[in-house]
Structure formats: structure tokens, C-alpha cells
Image: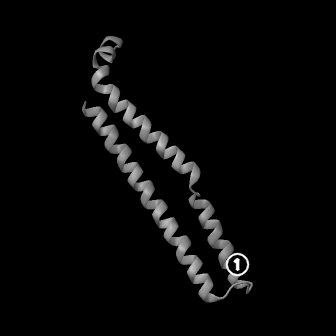
Amino acid sequence: MGLLSDILLAPVTGPAHLFVSLLETIRDQANAQMPSQEKLKDELVRLNARLELGEIDEAEFQKQEEELLAELKQMREDEQAAAAAEAQAAADEESQ
């Protein structure tokens, strides 16, 4: 688009751009605060090593493993939801 059309369409496209920018900022801050999938995988490896070394029993291992796997599953679902929201926002922006 040209400069003139950007200026004329600003009242219409401005809020959409602002909304997308806000979503990206929220996503970036959430990603910075949440542990990464790699950290959770490393924690699972350490947990398995602790079991093999006899530092924890099978019940404690299963409890902690279940918690870590649930967190990993939630993280993947959140990433998929965020990707879907971004795709929807991009599609909405293109249709305007």
C-alpha cells in the first residue's frame, strides 16, 4: 500500500495493528517467564537419573514425572493455541 492509503485507512487498520502488537508482547513476556520445553525435558532426564541412583523411590518418581509431563503437555497446547491465534489475527488483518 502507498502512504496515502495507509493514512486514510489508519482509523480502520490501526486498532488491528495495535491488537496484534499487544498479543505479541503478551506472548513474549509469557515465554520469558515460563520454563522452556528443553528445560522440562532436562528435568525429566535428571529425575530418571535420580531414580536409577536410588535417590528417590518409584512412587516419588511417578508423581514428579506426571507433574512434569502435564506441564510439558500444557506448554505444547499453549504454543498451539498461540500459533492459531496469530494465524487468525493475520488472516483478519489481511481481510481488512
Q: Which part of the image, by quadrant, shows the C terminus? A: top left
Between 11 and 83, the one nearer to me in the picture: 11
Q: Quadrant of the N terminus?
A: top left
Count of numbered tags: 1
The image shows residue 68 at horizontal and vertical percentages of 56, 71
What SS does tag 1 mark?
A: helix
Colouring convention used in this rendered image of the protein? one colour
Q: Nearer the viewer, residue 86 or 11?
A: 11
The reply, left or right, for residue 74 in relation to residue 84 is right
**Residue under the point 56% across and 60% down:** 37
Which residue is pictured at 53% across the width and 45% down the height?
29
The quarter holding residue 50 reads bottom right
In percent of the image, x 62 and y 84: which residue is there? 60
- Is residue 9 shown above or below 4? below
83 vs 39, left or right, is left
**Can you give x and y, in whole percent of width and height, for residue 28 in the image?**
52, 44
Relative to 30, say whether 15 is above or below.
above
* Residue of label 1: 49
Residue at position x 58%, y 52% in the image: 33
Whether residue 78 is situated above or below residue 22 in the rendered picture: below
**Farthest residue, direction left:** 95
User: Residue 74: horizontal and vertical position, in percent?
Assistant: 46, 64
> Could you tell me the amino acid type at mark 1?
Ala
Q: Residues within 10 Å of mark 1 (few under 14, many from 20)?
A: few
Percent across and percent down for residue 44 are 62, 72
> For this view, does 75 lie left or right of residue 86?
right
